[in-house]
Image: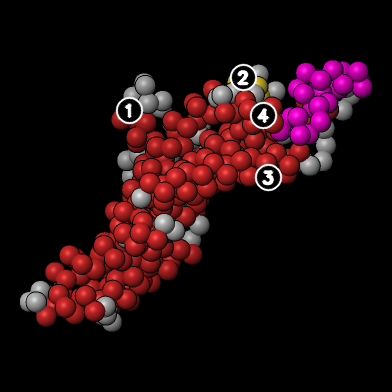
């Protein structure tokens, strides 16, 4: 198990370094000069040259990359040249919105999707299964921002139960902060719950035909008891893989949803950095997203090994 964990940690570190290099190269190749973009088209060449030197844009690309990488290791992501503030501080403030939003959306997708998938598998071939899978297919097909607009029309405009947008900081009023995240978290969760329901239903249908289920039935268990005690754990293996991919999708989906609901999260910050061509801020925000996604995949990988001991024994 120690060698298994060590290999995963090495892979985690290598992934982050490669991702940082790819992000730096892609953003460095973007056309245009950030210094001229900041100063405007009427800026003098001397002013542009001075700002390039201040921002470090006159240094060779490899030197700029390794300086940026070393700074990130020490928690220094640079200085945003449009907001005149440390990038680490800007990202830290926005994570208090994006991370709770993503976690809440993930929990909602699990609470909604897994029971629907289990119920559909237990009612295989019935009208109930057909109806549940039709709803799941509809949930997959509809984009999350459209769900968000429908939820606003129903619960904010029509019923006046929840706010249509905006966010109250956690330190001011945690209850109002949670209320502000409710609609966007449902908008993110519903498509993912639909995917989770279909995956869980398929996995359980396959498990119900396995030999260990027939053995459990022969010992006197009902189908429901056999599936719940022995089948669900085995069916969770593909579900865990999907959960890791879903969390990555949820983090990326916040870029759109946070703009729909006017949430001051990391997605909104990335959108602002793109529109203002703040490459330093954009690099830092994207690498934080990659760290969060890669760390989630690492955790799920270890959880996968805990559920399936064969992976630990092989060391894969």
Residue drawn where x is 73% and y is 42% of the image: 25
Q: Is residue 54 left or right of residue 79?
A: right
Magenta-highlighted residues? 44-65
Look at discs 3 and 2 and give the one toward the viewer. 3
Badge 1 crowding class, 10 Å Cα cut-off, few under 14, some 14 to 19, many 20 or more, is few
Q: Which residue is mark 3?
A: 22
Look at discs 2 and 1 and give the one toward the viewer. 2
Real-space CA distance between mark 2 and mark 1, rounded to the nearest whole angstrom: 26 Å
Real-space CA distance between mark 4 and mark 3, rounded to the nearest whole angstrom: 13 Å
> Going from the N terminus, do you reach mark 4 or mark 2 first?
4
Real-space CA distance between mark 3 and mark 2, rounded to the nearest whole angstrom: 25 Å
> Going from the N terminus, do you reach mark 1 or mark 3 first?
3
Relative vertical location of residue 171 with respect to residue 286 in this rendering, above or below: above
Could you tell me if the residues under marks 1 and 4 are in contact, i.e. CB atoms within 8 Å? no
The disc at residue 174 is 1
Real-space CA distance between mark 1 and mark 3, rounded to the nearest whole angstrom: 38 Å
Residue drawn where x is 86% and y is 22% of the image: 48
Real-space CA distance between mark 4 and mark 2, rounded to the nearest whole angstrom: 16 Å
Q: Which residue is mark 2?
A: 85
Residue 50, percent from left and from top: 84, 17
Q: Which residue is mark 4?
A: 68
SS class of the residue under badge 4?
Answer: helix
Q: Is residue 198 visible?
A: yes
């Amino acid at each position: 198990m120690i060698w298994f964990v060590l290999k995963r940690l090495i892979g985690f570190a290598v992934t982050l370094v490669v991702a940082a290099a790819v992000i730096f190269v892609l953003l460095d190749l973007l056309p245009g000069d950030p210094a001229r973009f900041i100063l405007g088209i009427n800026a003098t060449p001397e002013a542009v040259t001075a700002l390039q030197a201040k921002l470090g844009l006159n240094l060779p690309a490899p030197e700029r990359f390794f300086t940026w990488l070393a700074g990130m290791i020490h928690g220094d992501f640079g200085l945003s040249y449009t907001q005149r503030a440390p990038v680490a501080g800007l990202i830290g403030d926005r994570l208090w919105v994006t991370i709770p939003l993503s976690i809440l959306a993930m929990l909602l997708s699990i609470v909604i999707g897994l029971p629907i998938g289990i119920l559909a598998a237990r009612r295989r071939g019935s009208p109930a299964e057909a109806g549940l899978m039709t709803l799941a297919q509809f949930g997959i097909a509809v984009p999350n921002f459209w769900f968000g607009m429908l939820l606003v029309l129903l619960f904010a405009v029509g019923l006046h139960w929840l706010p249509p947008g905006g966010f109250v900081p956690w330190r001011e009023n945690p209850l109002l902060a949670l209320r502000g995240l409710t609609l966007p978290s449902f908008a993110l969760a519903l498509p993912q719950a639909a995917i989770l329901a279909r995956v869980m239903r398929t996995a359980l249908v396959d498990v119900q035909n396995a030999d260990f289920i027939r053995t459990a039935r022969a010992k006197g268990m009902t189908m429901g008891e056999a599936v719940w005690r022995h089948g669900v754990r085995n069916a969770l293996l593909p579900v865990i893989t999907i959960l890791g991919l879903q969390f990555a999708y949820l983090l990326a989906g916040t870029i759109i949803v946070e703009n729909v609901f006017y949430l001051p999260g990391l997605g909104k910050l990335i959108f602002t950095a793109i529109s203002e061509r703040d490459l330093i801020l954009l690099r830092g925000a994207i690498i934080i997203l990659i760290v969060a996604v890669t760390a989630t995949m690492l955790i799920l990988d270890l959880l996968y090994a805990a559920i399936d001991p064969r992976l630990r024994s092989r060391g894969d």
